[in-house]
Amino acid sequence: MNSIIISIGDELLIGQTVNTNATWMGKELNDIGVEVLEVLTVSDTEKAIEEALEYAGKKASLVLLTGGLGPTKDDITKKVFASYFNAPLVENKEALENVESFFLNYNRPILPINRLQALVPSGCDMLLNKVGTAPGMWMENDKAIFVSMPGVPYEMKYLMTEEVLKRVVEKFELPAIVHHTILVQGIGESYIAKEIADIEDGLPPYLKLAYLPSAGVVKLRLTGRGKNKSLLENEIKKTFEKIISRVSEYVFSELDISLEELVGEVLCDTKKTISTAESCTSGALAARITAVQGASAYFMGSIIAYSNQVKKSQLGVSESDLNNYGAVSEEVVKQMALGVKESMNTDYAISTSGIAGPGGGSEDNPVGTVWIGIATPSGVTAHQFQMGKGRNRIVEKTILAALKLVLVEVKSSFRIIN
């Protein structure tokens, strides 16, 4: 069972709206055993929608459309949908009652244009949209099932959850699709591939390994497809045990969650607190930590010491060390970490100082050079990194490296196992 998602709307093509619908739909379809072959994004034109329907109907057994079902003239999906099936639009009584009820609940007059929402292609299964006025439409031919839904996310999600997914599960005998992900930090995907080449080459055809790299982190995802879910889960577990044995020092989680969430969980479990002193990350590290719900239980605060003056006055960094070693140095980040740890009275503290560029580098300290300090209950250490080029990328990699260092420190202190 496979599917193609067609997202309709000029706003998606010009970047005015992010296509979150397709991402959500892909996950939900995968969870029930439906493989998404493609996501097509097309403009609000008859030709584009017709061509997408023709293409998808030949390639997939389930075609899902979102967008273009509003009451205004620029919403033409329903018209094209009806034309594609050579089915005239007819008024659906239940859909009209839903539209009338919607406007009555909001104490607003219903306009003639709003009543047009109740028109659906003859012969379709109308999917009642109880959170909006545009109904969903389920049509079938001898090749595929076509479902058209509104583009408003909460309306689409309602119809998918209450109607579409249930119908697909009832109609088809679906395979099991199992995913498992581990997160790796501190090693590139090409180096991982080299370390596990024989394992990857020996995978059976029903298991697939995917590398999902981002700045500083690589996700390794194993996907299994078959009839027996428990057997797939067992084989994926055994395969990952082999992979982890090769790159264990770089694996920080066997759960598909973020580093900041893991750090938060470990700090909560150990009832420890943390603070940050930031130069090159300019508060972005603190923002990442506090983006996790419940961070107030373990995060006490941050000092953004972008200038040397603030490093001296707020963190107690020695002026002579700044002069002798520079702001981007082992000596300075250690003092920054200790300074904020004392100031915020926390168990742990992270400090960052680096050259994010594009200027400011030297032969000794080129752009991308970063020092990270970690102050713990037992002392302070500093770690040097070369984060490459690109200001935003350097900051992102610094954040991830800092979080990984804290995670390792806390886990080793309390012997916490994933």
Image: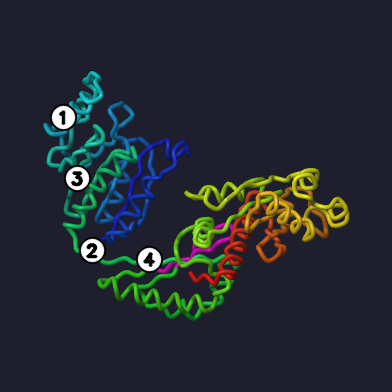
**Mark 4 = which residue?**
179
Task: Give me the C-alpha separation between circle 4 and circle 3.
Answer: 29 Å
What amino acid is at disc 4? His
Mark 4 and mark 2 lie on one chain; the one further toward the N terminus is 2
**Mark 2 = which residue?**
174
Q: Which residue is more in the foreground, 206 or 157?
A: 157
Question: Is residue 362 visible to the viewer in this orientation of the structure?
Answer: yes
User: Dot 3: within a 10 Å radius of its alpha carbon, few (fewer than 14), some, or many (20 or more) residues?
Assistant: many
Mark 2 and mark 1 lie on one chain; the one further toward the N terminus is 1
**Mark 1 = which residue?**
96
What amino acid is at disc 2? Leu
User: Dot 1: within a 10 Å radius of its alpha carbon, few (fewer than 14), some, or many (20 or more) residues?
Assistant: many
Snapshot colouring: rainbow
Task: Give me the C-alpha separation between circle 2 and circle 1.
Answer: 35 Å
Residue 214, picture quadrant: bottom right
* Element type at mark 3: strand
Task: Give me the C-alpha separation between circle 4 and circle 2.
Answer: 16 Å
In x, y percent, where is residue 160? 26, 47
Residue 13, picture quadrant: top left
Mark 4 and mark 3 lie on one chain; the one further toward the N terminus is 3
